[in-house]
Image: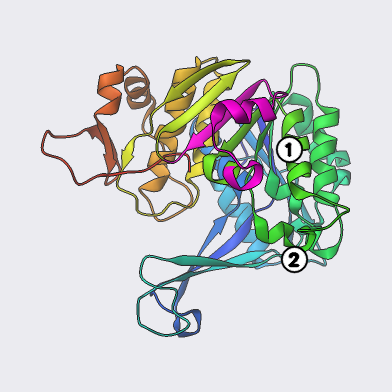
Amino acid sequence: MTNPAPPLAVCVGESMITLLPEQAGPLEAAELFRRGMGGAESNTACALASLGVPTAWVSRVGADGFGRLLLTEIAAHGVDVSGVEVDPHRPTGLYVKEIGAGTGSVHDLGTGRSKLHYYRSASAASALAPAALELPAVAALLATARLVHLSGITAALGQASGGDSGRRLVQAVLDRRRPGQLVSFDMNWRPALWRRLQGSAAVDPVAVLAGLADQADVVFIGSDEAEILFGTADPQRLRALLPGPRVLVVKNAEHGACAFEGDAAVTEPALRVEVLEPIGAGDAFAAGYLAGLLRGHDQRRRLRLGHVCAASTLMVAHDHAAPPSPAELDRLLECTPREWSGLRAGAGVIAAAAPTDDSAVTAEAAS
């Protein structure tokens, strides 16, 4: 259903159908798949809505069954999909997951390894462009939003076919923001989307992403992708490289997350999580942090809300998970530092660990 409240947040970007094999092994051996959906911005939109933030998603889907499924499923999470354009000519994109099984086959990825195969280069979402902002429904959504959320994935869409419509769309959102409206940007480095331009003298993907991020108000970057893009994961050095955003959040797989507001930095450790599936956790972290920002939380509570939302997603096999109840969230956000460090997340529950509990593994909730 469509959320009746005008959206406080609008997430702009791609979503795809996911096909997940029921059994591990080389893709050609998989006979049964279960369908799902995935996309950084739609994941964040669903997570924001689950936290009670009126949210809309702006994108494009094909005039096909997969497109109808995306619209139905995302709307069922409480997200306004009135700004999604249906393309009568291009299909809805999809990706297929392959899971290693350790069979010894030359084509087996190996136990514990997985790979995503994307089929999106000619999809409806790959044609996202600044013209989307002119659609009456989209213009109406943006007119009320306090926050617009984007990612580096959108900036890369269309590159494979030689265009730069996605980058121009991100730039247009940055250029057209109203006074007081925030734009958040999750770096979301996806080298496969930029591979065509690697080594190109005309376009430097790192420079493009850094330039867009430095114009945003809130930026999220993982330490792993920061190391690849900028040659450093040190939060202070990254802040020096990206001085423009009002807020810079650096997510560190070992230590938690560090948020800069101006030059002041706050670091909050990640929860210890029994991880079932990591996909979608970074999007959930962004949603939690942004929900906290919109509600006026201080920096530590924003980071904690991000960690809690990400931990909830890490404990499920899908890209989305319901957060704890509002009362439980309040309890978690009010923990003392000692109480927070003693929390463990597993089997869908976040609670203080028993003294003998050493089964949980450390997992950065925002990776």
**Does 23 sit above or below residue 305?**
below
* Residue 252 is a magenta residue: yes
Magenta span = 227-253
- Please name the residue shown 33% across and 24% down the image: 332
Helix, strand or loop for disc 2: loop
Picture coordinates of residue 90, whole percent (x, y): 79, 66
Position of residue 262 measured from the top left corner of the image (x, y, whole percent): 63, 15
Question: Which of the 4 image quarters holds residue 330?
Answer: top left
Residue 6 visible (yes or no): no
Residue 6: x %, y % from top left: 68, 28
User: Height in image: 201 above or below 22?
Assistant: above
For the N terminus, the image quarter is: top right
Q: Are marks 2 and 1 in contact (CB under 8 Å)?
A: no
What number is the disc on residue 314?
none
Residue 283 horizontal/vertical position (percent): 54, 42
- Give the residue type at disc 2: Ser
Question: Is residue 78 shown left or right of residue 257?
Answer: right
331 horizontally vs 136: left or right: left
Q: Which mark is residue 121?
A: 2
Q: Nearer the viewer, residue 316 or 300?
A: 300
Q: Name the element at disc 1.
A: helix
Residue identifier under label 1: 210
Q: Is residue 227 among the parts visible in the rendering? A: yes
Give the class, few, some or many, for how many residues have Cα within 10 Å of label 1's Cα (few <14, many ≥20).
some
For the residue marked with disc 1, what is the amino acid?
Ala
The image quadrant that residue 219 belongs to is: top right
